[in-house]
Image (spheres, rainbow, N blue to C red):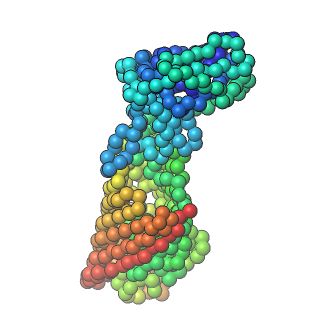
C-alpha cells in the first residue's frame, strides 16, 4: 500500500491514502482516520511512502467518498469480491483499500458488478496496526517535525517517490482522476450489458469440415477447408466490444444452420449494437454466385444469405434486433424448369442473455413478385465454464418460388414450395487453453410441393467437425 504526503506549504502536510481525486480536490484518508479534502492547486510537493500495512484503524466519515463494492461471477452466481475504495489503477488491474484495512488488487476482467454505498457509517478496519510509524520528511523539508502514528515500536518510513514539478504532480492527479472516472463509468454503463464482456480479447484460426451441405455450398461456392479467422476485442468491462469473423463457419443469425463463407462484424457500445455480413464469394465468383439448376435436386428449393445488416438496442439482459437490410439468394427447380430470385428478408427478434446462457429468437418474411421467404429461428446457447460451449438451434423456413423459368423452357412457370424444419446442435470443447475442438449435427425435414401439386418429404442429415488454434 502506498501512502502519500501532500504538502501545501513548508512543513504543512497531510499524510494518508488518496481515496479520490476530482478536477478541483483531493480526498485523503489521514493518519487519524478522517477523510480530508485538499485543493489541488495548493499542493506544491508530493511524496510517496510504501508500507505493508494500513497505519490507520478506522474511517470516521466515509460519506465523503462512497464505498465501492465489486461483484464477480463465482459458483454460478454473483458474489462480492471486494468492498472498499479504489486507490490505484493500471491498465489491467485496480488496487483497493478494503474494509479489512489491507490492499486488495483485482483484475478488471473479474468485475461483474459495481455498486456505490453513499450512506455508509463510520468503519472500523478489522486489521489493526501494531507498530508506530514515523513518516520521514523529504530532504527539502528535513527540519520539519515528523508525523507519527500511535503504537508501541516506532518504525521509520522513508519516501520512495518525490514529485516537486507542478506538471508532474498534475499528471499524477490526472491519472487518478481518469481511474476513478472509469470505475464510475462501470457503474453507470453496466445497465446496458448482460455480462461485462460479451466479447473478450482473443484471436483464433480454425477450420470447419462439413458433410451434407445444401445451402452453405453450391457448385461454385465451397464451405470446406476455408480457414475461419475470429478476432474478439474488448476495451474493458462494460466498454466497447466487437467480434469479427472471416472464412467458413456457422452463422447463428442465418436462415440455415450450415457453415458458409462470410465476412461478419458485430459491435456493441453501451445501449447500441450493430452487425453486418457479406459473403466474399459475391466478389470472388461474381455472376456464378447464384444458384444453378445442377445445384438443386429434381424437385427442390434452396436459399442462402449473401448479405445481411442488423442493428438494435440493449438494456440489461434483453436486446432487441432489427434486421432491415440484406439480400437472400433463392432458387427453385422442378425437373427441367428452374428459376432464381434475389429476395430481401427483413428480420426482427430479441436476445435474452445471462452470464452462462442466452436465448436468441428472430423471425423474418420477405417477398419479390410472387416468390417469398419466411423464417423463424431460435438459438439456445449454454456455456459450461470457459472450456465448454453448447448451442441448440431450431429453424422453420418456408421457400416459395413462383416465377418464369429460363428461355430454354420457353419461359414456362416454375412453382415450387419448400417447407422445412431443422434441428441442429453444436458442441465446442477447449483443450489446454489454446485449442478448440467442435462438432455439429443436424437433421432437416423438408416437404417440397412442385408445379404439378405433388409433394414429397425428405430427411437430410448433416454434420461437421471443427478445429481451431487460439493466439
- Asked whether 422 or 89 is in front, the reply is 89
- Asked whether 407 or 103 is in front, the reply is 103
**Residue at 35% across / 59% down in the picture?**
384
Give the total of numbered labels: 0
Residue 275: x and y, percent?
Answer: 49, 55
Quadrant of the image occupied by residue 63:
top left
| Left or right of residue 208, residue 168 in this image | right
Residue 202: x and y, percent?
Answer: 53, 58
Quadrant of the image occupied by residue 136:
top right
Confirm whether residue 400 shows in the render.
no
Confirm whether residue 394 shows in the render.
yes
**Residue at 37% across / 69% down in the picture?**
426
**Residue at 52% across / 22% down in the picture?**
153
Q: Identify whether 167 is placed above or below 294.
A: above
Residue 279: x and y, percent?
Answer: 53, 68
Residue 316: x and y, percent?
Answer: 37, 42
Q: Quadrant of the C terminus?
A: bottom right
Q: Identify whether 56 is placed above or below 232.
A: above
- Asked whether 258 or 367 is in front, the reply is 258
Quadrant of the image occupied by residue 446:
bottom left
Q: Identify whether 356 is placed above or below 69.
A: below
Q: Quadrant of the N terminus?
A: top right
**Residue at 49% across / 20% down in the picture?**
152
- Asked whether 419 or 434 is in front, the reply is 434
Amino acid at each position: 500500500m502506498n501512502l502519500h504526503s501532500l504538502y501545501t506549504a513548508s512543513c504543512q502536510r497531510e499524510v494518508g491514502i488518496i481515496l479520490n481525486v476530482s478536477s478541483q480536490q483531493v480526498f485523503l484518508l489521514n493518519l487519524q482516520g478522517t477523510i480530508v479534502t485538499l485543493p489541488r492547486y495548493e499542493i506544491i510537493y508530493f511524496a510517496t511512502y510504501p508500507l505493508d500495512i494500513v497505519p490507520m484503524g478506522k474511517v470516521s466519515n466515509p460519506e465523503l467518498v462512497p464505498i465501492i463494492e465489486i461483484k464477480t461471477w463465482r459458483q454460478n452466481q454473483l458474489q462480492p469480491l471486494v468492498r472498499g475504495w479504489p486507490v490505484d489503477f493500471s491498465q489491467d488491474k485496480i488496487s483497493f483499500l478494503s474494509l479489512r484495512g489491507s490492499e486488495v488488487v483485482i483484475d478488471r476482467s473479474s468485475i461483474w458488478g459495481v455498486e456505490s454505498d453513499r450512506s455508509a457509517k463510520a468503519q472500523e478496519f478489522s486489521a489493526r496496526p501494531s507498530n508506530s510509524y514515523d513518516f520521514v520528511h523529504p530532504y527539502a523539508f528535513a527540519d520539519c517535525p515528523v508525523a507519527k502514528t500511535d503504537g508501541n515500536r516506532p518504525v521509520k518510513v522513508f519516501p520512495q517517490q518525490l514529485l516537486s514539478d507542478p506538471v508532474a504532480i498534475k499528471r499524477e492527479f490526472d491519472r487518478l482522476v481518469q481511474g476513478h472516472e472509469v470505475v464510475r463509468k462501470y457503474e453507470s454503463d453496466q445497465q446496458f450489458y448482460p455480462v461485462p464482456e460479451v466479447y473478450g480479447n482473443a484471436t483464433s484460426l480454425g477450420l470447419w469440415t462439413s458433410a451434407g451441405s445444401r445451402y452453405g455450398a453450391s457448385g461454385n461456392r465451397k464451405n470446406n477447408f476455408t480457414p475461419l479467422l475470429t478476432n474478439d476485442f474488448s476495451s474493458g468491462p462494460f466498454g466497447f466490444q466487437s467480434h469479427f469473423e472471416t472464412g467458413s463457419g456457422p452463422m447463428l443469425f442465418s436462415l440455415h444452420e450450415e457453415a458458409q463463407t462470410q465476412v461478419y462484424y458485430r459491435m456493441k457500445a453501451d445501449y447500441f449494437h450493430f452487425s453486418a455480413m457479406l459473403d466474399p464469394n459475391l466478389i470472388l465468383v461474381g455472376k456464378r454466385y447464384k444458384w444453378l439448376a445442377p445445384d438443386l435436386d429434381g424437385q427442390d428449393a434452396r436459399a442462402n444469405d449473401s448479405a445481411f445488416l442488423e442493428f438494435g438496442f440493449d438494456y440489461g439482459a434483453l436486446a432487441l434486433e432489427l434486421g432491415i437490410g440484406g439480400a437472400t439468394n433463392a432458387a427453385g427447380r422442378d425437373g427441367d424448369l428452374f428459376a432464381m430470385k434475389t429476395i430481401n428478408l427483413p428480420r426482427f427478434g430479441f436476445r435474452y442473455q445471462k452470464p452462462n446462457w442466452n436465448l436468441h429468437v428472430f423471425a423474418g418474411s420477405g417477398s419479390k413478385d410472387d416468390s417469398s421467404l419466411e423464417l423463424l429461428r431460435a438459438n439456445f446457447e449454454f456455456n459450461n465454464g470457459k472450456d465448454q460451449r453448447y448451442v441448440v438451434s431450431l429453424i422453420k423456413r418456408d421457400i416459395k418460388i413462383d416465377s418464369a423459368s429460363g428461355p430454354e423452357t420457353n419461359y414456362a412457370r416454375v412453382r415450387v414450395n419448400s417447407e422445412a424444419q431443422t434441428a441442429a446442435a453444436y458442441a465446442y470443447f477447449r483443450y489446454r487453453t489454446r485449442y478448440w475442438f467442435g462438432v455439429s449435427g443436424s437433421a432437416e425435414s423438408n416437404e417440397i410441393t412442385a408445379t404439378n401439386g405433388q409433394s414429397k418429404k425428405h430427411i437430410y442429415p448433416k454434420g461437421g467437425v471443427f478445429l481451431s488454434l487460439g493466439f
